[in-house]
Amino acid sequence: MRILLFLLLLMMAISTHAGPSSRTVALRDIADKVIAPGYQDLAVRARALTNAVEQLAKAPDAKSLQAAGDAWSATLLAARRLQAFQAGPMTEREYASSFYYWQVLPVRMEAVVESPRAIDKAMVDELGATTKGLFALEYLLFGRTNSEPGADALKLLAGSERRRSYTLALARDIEMKAGELARDWERSDAQGAKAKFVAGGQESLNVLVNQLASTIESIAENRIKFVLSLPQPVSRQLDRIEGSHSGTSLGGIVAMMEGVRTMYKGGDGSGLDDAVRQVNADLEQRLEEKLDAALAALVGLESPLERAVVEKREEVQKAYEAVRALEIAFKTELPSVLGVTITFNSGDGD
Amino acid sequence: MLFGFVMAAAMVRFLAKGWVAEFYTRPAFHFPYSGFEWVRALPEGCMQGIFALLALAAICVAIGFCYRLCITLFFIGFTYIELIDQTLYLNHYYLVSLLSGLMIFLPANGAWSMDALRRPEIRSDVAPAWTLNLLRFQVAVVYIFAGLAKLNADWLLQAQPLRIWLAARSDLPIVGPLLDQTWVAFAASWFGAAFDLTIVFLLLCARTRKTAYAAVIVFHLATLALFNIGMFPCIMIASATLFFAPGWPRRFIVVAQTDSLPHRRLETCPTPKLTCALLAIYAAVQLALPLRPYLQSQPAAWTCHGFNLAWQVMIAEKTGYVEFTAADPLTNEHWRVPLNDLLTPRQQIMMAQDPDLIRAMARHLARMYSDQGRPVEIRCEAFASFNGRPAQRLIDPTVNLAGPLPREWVVRVARL
């Protein structure tokens, strides 16, 4: 009994000396250095978007429309960099569709423009995902004309004050939501998103790893492979390619992959890579190489996806294979080495 | 008694966690065992009723009420639920089936039971030695083969999979940071192997029994705290008492009235020849089944051939991923087959690790399409990571899993 007590005390002493586990540090740094600053950046971009749309609403011309479009693109990319992790406030507040749902319905949006109802916050709150959010703004700012993107958008905006009000109301809605999310992740109390994320321990890790894997799968299958499988000519299928009207089809997925990478590495702090390296350094090396290869293959496409699939089809195929290899690694090796499979599973094991 | 109470708690736990619906009635498809395809899940109400009856039967076993009937019903009912779906296989469920099956033939209600109270003719303060030795043999087989399974390079030289599993619990208070340390994983691996291989002998030896049982309790409580292994630790802590000297409870519990009643005393007599023969056959089967993995050229944890029923306990961390593609040989059309409507997330996780279950799924998909008048070939992209190895293909992607299989349809695993 004395020996057991001694061993227990010795273990506690060693444990105290060992400090917090690499996973706890990783979760803390991912929250502090990646997620929270990411939402801050999104809030800043959303604010800049509202400012640009206000200018457009006051004086609609090519310059103000260009500025609003650029601000929109910057906001979208900031949102894409966070798309790999949507747990916490984004899910609790049910804001994900406002930032990521892209299949808006122009018919319904035009009905909103034509409707006599006053465009205010109450009205925007009642709108569904097909008529509001970032991609509803894309429709209003970039239009749907394939030959001259934006031409009809400027004409329509200039000709309708109600349309400009609608655009501004949607921008303000995005700004409000981005601000709320940023404040949620800035809270330092025990009920704040950051504290809950870190306190979640293995559970948070499970969710994070699964969502990272799911994001990579989405890039590989729903974006790149989907575009590769579209019938020719692709120019007639632009409505089926996310971000094609704003020219962000490639930029968006590059930002998503950058988000995956940053979350995996914990920004300039500790990340999942450190937790993996603790258990299997060779595996961490392989994962990093695959991440770098996938990102490089995507960045190397340079043109928007709808053009790259026509002009550089082989390179798009190689980019798919690189992302696919990363997808397999994130679905097998990464969960396995972090014990995600065995813990993120109902039922007993032995 | 301990077995009955532990199993009653296990059945209530199943019901309380909602696992009856999640595992048995919600899935649209089950993976039956070969030869047991006729075993099907019943509607939810019936399954809930079965689990409730099993809990009741277990309590009756514990208190020795209509013991023979209840243990038989428990054995049949529990084995039935285990045969429904291979993805639910657990070593300790297999052990429960074996123990409950053996207990049908044992006079476990001869003393300290309601039956003995009601029927004086069955009372006895002794039982044939083979009844105790049979149960000891069964539990010993579990420990020793579990220990032998740990004598491999992954476990001893790489401390896998404990390096992964212990690090996954590094958020535990006090001991958490220790579990992140590699040396702890190595120490736990070597201790675990030594424990499994020696504990039976230490329990059998009177001099070391007390310390050994203390180690059993500490070891299994630690596994209960660290790993998600359900009732396994409780079952092993209870079954370790089989190695105590017979009649050990009488040293601790004074039973007033029944002890003063007349008992039937058995004359010393040899075990009947038929009993000996049956015991020998049973022992031979129980020794042969766990030897199957050692006849494979690939680790059984990778191929899953000979892995179940072999006491390969907690020796593999394996994560798989599989996608099925159907191909129409006439039109050359091929398409990906989604599984979310057919399998639960848990079934998909378990299937993705097991080539035989992947094949069973492929054959089921082929049958489905064939029933719609569209014969197809089914291939898969299957990858797995095993004990920290790089993810690699599990199954040859060119093989039509719905047809005859070539010899090497399971890809060989790379060395660590």
Image (cartoon, rainbow, N blue to C red):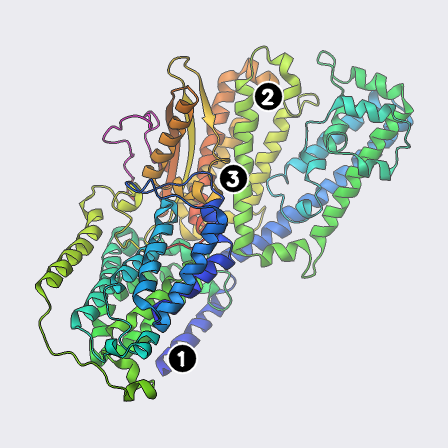
Amino acid at the residue labelled 3: Ala
Q: Which residues are magenta?
A: B393-413
Q: Tag 2: residue type? A: Leu
Name the residue nearer the viewer: B34 or B165: B34
Tag 3 residue: A213
**CB of mark 2 within 8 Å of CB of mark 1?**
no
Q: Marks 2 and 1, Cα distance to the nearest angstrom?
A: 64 Å
The answer to whether tags 3 and 1 share a subunit is: yes
Identify the mark at residue A5; answer none if there is no mark: 1
Q: Earlier in the sequence, mark 3 or mark 1?
A: 1
Q: x%, y% of residue B253? A: 34, 85
Which numbered dot is residue A305? 2
Q: Amino acid at mark 1?
A: Leu
Is B265 located above or below residue A309 in the figure? Answer: below
Dot 2, how many residues are within 10 Å of its Cα: few (below 14), some (14-19), or many (20+)? many
Task: Name the magenta segment's main secondary structure.
Answer: loop
Q: Secondary structure at mark 1?
A: helix
Question: Can you say whether B107 is above or below B398 in the image?
Answer: below
Q: Is residue B161 magenta?
A: no
Query: Residue at point 30% right, 63% down?
Result: B192
Judge left or right: residue A198 versus residue A159.
Answer: left
Residue A343 makes an appearance in the image: no
